Image (cartoon, rainbow, N blue to C red):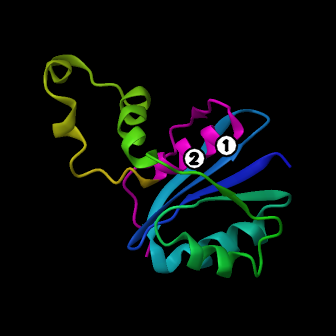
Amino acid sequence: MSKIIAIDPGISKCGVIIADIKDKIVYEGVVLKSNLLLKYVRKKYQKEKNLQCLIGNGTSSKNYIKDLNHFVPNLIIAEEKNSTYRAKQRYFEIFPLRGIRCFLPREIFILNKNLDALAALIIIEDYLNIRFEVSEKIKTKTWLK
């Protein structure tokens, strides 16, 4: 299987990354409301063939794991310790500050960012021990309705 979907589960929102393992590239990343996660993953499984699924073992993951097991074969549960914290650092690797912004504290630029998609990226990179390239399509602040 070449494609994998990684999920950073949360109580109110979830980060989702879809990546190609062979090419080592993330081609989709979103943050969506938690109540939409199962519908979103099910839709991806209907469209994509040979898709693996990996979910972090953190916040509220037990409920998602139970529900995902109904339609996701071979669900992988991965450690997600400190993934959101580490997503802040990864954010600036992917979206580096330019110009005068380089001299300001980084923290002021991510206060309103939803880093859950990047936390899902951290989970997948840790689990596979692969560093992924990120395409321009990744969005760190996306809410699907």
- The residue to which callout 1 is attached is 127
Seen in the image, is 142 located left or right of residue 110? right
Whether label 2 touches label 1, CB < 8 Å = yes
Residue 27 in percent (x, y) is at: 62, 44
Residue drawn at x 60%, y 72% as measured from the top left? 40
Residue 115 in percent (x, y) is at: 38, 50
Q: How far apart are marks 2 and 1 (CA)?
A: 6 Å
Residue drawn at x 15%, y 28% as measured from the top left? 105
- The boundaries of the magenta stretch are 117-145
Q: Tag 2's secondary structure?
A: helix
Residue drawn at x 43%, y 33% as measured from the top left? 90
Please identify the quarter of the rendering in which residue 19 is found. top right
- Amino acid type, residue under disc 1 in the picture: Tyr
Queried whether the magenta region covers residue 128, the answer comes back as: yes
- The residue to which callout 2 is attached is 123
Please identify the quarter of the rendering in which residue 11 is found. bottom left
Residue 79's place in the image compared with 129, above or below, is below
Please identify the quarter of the rendering in which residue 64 is found. bottom right
Residue 104 in percent (x, y) is at: 13, 25
- Amino acid type, residue under disc 2 in the picture: Ile
Residue drawn at x 75%, y 33% as measured from the top left? 23
Quadrant occupied by the C terminus? bottom left
Residue 9's place in the image compared with 112, above or below, is below
Queried whether the magenta region covers residue 49, the answer comes back as: no
